[in-house]
Structures are given as structure tokens and as C-alpha cells.
């Protein structure tokens, strides 16, 4: 009797286990098919907060009072704690090409292969330097303050880089004599990154190093370590965060273009007056400017970089970089070759190397 009961109980347990496994398999299959159908035919919408990043590059943002990323910090996504961008774009209120609403502050969009390199130059060069055919070469160019629109000396960060490049031994040999100059240039470099709203500067690394240098004894181990960190960090700050742009000091031409822009803005849309103003604005404008090598390696150079405060080492880097030649090849539809390590910049690699680069 007992044996029969145990046999029945054992069979019941096995059947219950099998039924449970069957139900799990059926439910898993249903859930998988349901998920597949919903994903394919009814895909979930990405939360608007993840798509609606705060920074904006529309031209009208240059005329607004407070613009995230321009006049103050902005977050790329709701996870601002990890993706915070203090100030990622310096507005140019004196650039009629963008303030008119005709072009975006970063205007190059047509070629996905070249737009990033062209827009990089837009952050520290006025449009006319590339898009107006010069009457003479080298072009007489100056630095212009973004806030005032007036000519100024070379940006402080360039002067600081030049000091470190040409007087590195003197800085370590006579720290007390160079201490004040370094702090003064650092303060001005930080001021150039300060948003227009009066918030603190937008460069945490330079701000931290400035504090370390200012609060330590010149020549002390802490001071020397901070100086070495600053020297290593400076090359990463030569990418346009200058608070200034390179421009041609032609006041008459600038005033004329500003008047043409004013005429364009006050004229009714699609009116003959607006079309005539637009034609006058673009008279003499080169839609596709010259090759990269006009500045990066050409002779004579389109712009005298030494007159703009660039150090000899920085000039050699800019004029000898193989990237400019490669970008020019891409723009002209020529084959793209990776530079050979140790070879002459811009030279075509051997046949075997070309095959491996394709």
C-alpha cells in the first residue's frame, strides 16, 4: 500500500515538473515572439530628453540672451553629471554670415568627409579668410576680439605656449622671474573661455593648474610639477578656445558687408530688394576655397603664422602635418593613404602598403 502511494506521488511530481517546464517554455516562446513583433512593428520611442540635447547651433541662438553651451554650461543629455559640457562653442556676434541667419555658426555640412575639418577652422577664423580671393599673398591678417570686434594681440594661450617652447629651461632655472608672467597669461587665457553671462571660466584643467601654481612657492616641487603638467596640457588648448578669431583688418570692407547685411534683413522675404542685397553680399565670394596646402605647407603661405604669434615649433607642426595633404586628397577625390611612420609627410606609400590601407 505504501509502495503504491509512493509510486503515485512520484508520478504526480514528475508530471507537475514536466508541466512546469512546458509552461515555462511556452511562456518564454510567447514572450520572445511578442517582443520581436513589438520591436519590429511598434518600436518604442526614445525618450525626448535623450534626443533633445540642450546645445544649439542655429544662427538665432547668437541673438538670444542666454544660450546653453554658448553663454553658459549645457548638458548633452539628462545625465548631465557625466556628460556636462561647460562651454563648447564661442559665439561670434560680429560675423554677419551667421548673425544674419543665412548660415549656421558651424556652416560646413555638405561633405561628411570634410565638414569637421572645415568647421574646426570656423571656430578661430573669419569666413572671409578662406572664401574671399586675396589680392596679395601672404594675406595681412590679425587677431580680432570676439566681444568687441577690434584687433588684439595674439591670444594668451598662444603666448603661453610660445613661452614654454622657447624658454623651457629659463622657466625651471629662474622660476621666480617667470612666475608672474605665467600667472598673468594663464589668467588671460582663462578669461577668454569665460561665458558672457559672467560665470566662472569653462576650463577646469587650466583653472586647477592656475590654482596650484599660484598657491605654491616658485621653484618648489609642487610648483615644478604643476608647471610640467601645464606644459603637457597646453597643446590640447590650441584648438580655437581663444576668445578671438583671425581676420583681415579691412574696416571699410567689414562696414560695407555689415550695411549689405542690414539691407538684406530689413527687406521683405522674396522681394527684389532682398535678392539684390544677397547678390551684393556674395559678390567676390569663393564658394569652394583653395586647397588646404595654401596654409599647410604651400609657398608662399597664405597667412604668416609667425605674425599671428604662433611659435616656430607650432608653425612647423601646422605646415608639416600630413593630415592637411590627406584631407586635400579626399576633397579632390584622390586616393586616401595613411602616412608612413618615419617617411616624408604626404608621400604615397609603396604598392604593398597601399594595398594594406585600402
Image: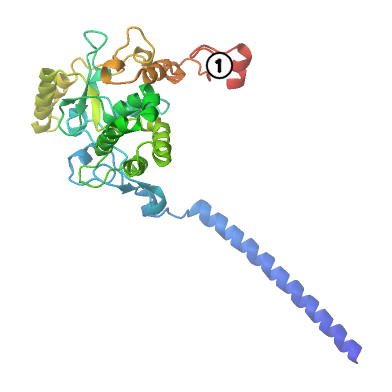
> Of 158 and 149, which appears nearest the observer?
158
Figure coloring: rainbow
At which x and y percent is residue 175?
35, 32
> Of 290 and 148, which appears nearest the observer?
148
Residue 272 appears in view: no
Which residue is at a point 25% across and 19% down the rendered structure image?
A: 129
Looking at the rendered image, the quarter that the C terminus falls into is top right
Which residue is at a point 89% across and 87% down the rendered structure image?
A: 4
At which x and y percent is residue 71?
23, 44
At which x and y percent is residue 176?
32, 33
Looking at the rendered image, the quarter that the N terminus falls into is bottom right
273 vs 207: above or below: above
Q: Hey, which quadrant is residue 144 in on the image?
A: top left
Which residue is at a point 45% across and 20% down the rendered structure image?
A: 323
Residue 16 appears in view: yes
51 vs 142: above or below: below
Q: Hey, which quadrant is residue 97 in on the image?
A: top left
358 vs 65: above or below: above
At which x and y percent is residue 260?
11, 24
Judging by the rendered image, the residue that carries numbered circle 1 is 342
Amino acid at each position: 500500500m505504501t509502495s503504491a502511494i509512493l509510486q503515485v506521488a512520484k508520478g504526480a511530481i514528475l508530471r507537475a515538473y514536466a508541466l512546469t517546464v512546458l509552461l515555462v517554455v511556452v511562456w518564454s516562446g510567447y514572450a520572445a515572439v511578442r517582443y520581436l513583433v513589438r520591436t519590429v512593428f511598434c518600436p518604442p520611442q526614445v525618450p525626448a530628453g535623450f534626443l533633445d540635447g540642450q546645445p544649439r547651433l542655429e544662427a538665432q541662438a547668437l541673438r538670444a540672451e542666454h544660450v546653453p553651451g554658448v553663454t553658459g554650461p549645457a548638458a548633452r543629455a539628462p545625465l548631465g553629471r557625466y556628460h556636462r559640457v561647460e562651454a563648447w562653442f564661442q559665439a561670434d556676434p560680429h560675423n554677419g554670415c551667421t548673425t544674419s541667419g543665412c548660415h549656421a555658426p558651424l556652416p560646413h555640412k555638405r561633405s561628411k568627409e570634410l565638414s569637421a575639418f572645415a568647421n574646426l577652422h570656423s571656430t578661430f577664423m573669419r569666413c572671409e579668410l578662406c572664401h574671399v580671393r586675396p589680392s596679395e599673398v601672404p594675406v595681412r591678417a590679425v587677431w580680432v576680439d570676439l566681444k568687441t570686434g577690434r584687433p588684439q594681440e595674439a591670444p594668451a594661450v598662444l603666448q603661453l605656449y610660445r613661452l614654454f617652447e622657447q624658454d623651457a629651461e629659463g622657466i625651471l632655472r629662474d622660476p621666480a622671474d617667470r612666475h608672474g608672467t605665467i600667472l598673468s597669461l594663464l589668467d588671460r587665457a582663462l578669461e577668454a573661455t569665460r561665458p558672457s553671462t559672467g560665470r566662472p571660466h569653462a576650463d577646469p584643467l587650466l583653472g586647477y593648474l592656475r590654482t596650484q601654481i599660484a598657491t605654491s612657492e616658485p621653484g618648489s616641487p609642487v610648483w615644478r610639477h604643476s608647471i610640467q603638467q601645464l606644459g603637457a596640457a597646453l597643446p590640447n588648448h590650441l584648438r580655437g578656445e581663444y576668445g578671438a578669431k583671425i581676420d583681415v583688418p579691412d574696416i571699410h570692407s567689414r562696414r560695407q558687408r555689415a550695411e549689405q547685411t542690414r539691407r538684406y534683413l530689413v527687406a521683405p522675404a522674396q522681394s527684389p530688394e532682398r535678392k539684390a542685397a544677397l547678390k551684393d553680399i556674395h559678390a567676390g565670394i569663393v564658394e569652394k576655397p583653395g586647397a588646404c596646402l595654401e596654409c599647410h605647407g604651400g609657398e608662399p603661405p597664405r597667412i604668416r603664422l609667425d605674425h599671428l604669434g604662433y611659435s616656430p615649433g607650432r608653425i612647423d607642426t601646422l605646415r608639416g602635418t600630413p593630415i592637411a595633404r590627406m584631407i586635400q586628397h579626399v576633397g579632390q577625390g584622390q586616393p586616401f593613404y595613411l602616412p608612413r611612420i618615419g617617411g616624408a609627410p604626404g608621400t604615397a606609400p609603396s604598392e604593398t602598403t597601399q594595398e594594406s590601407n585600402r
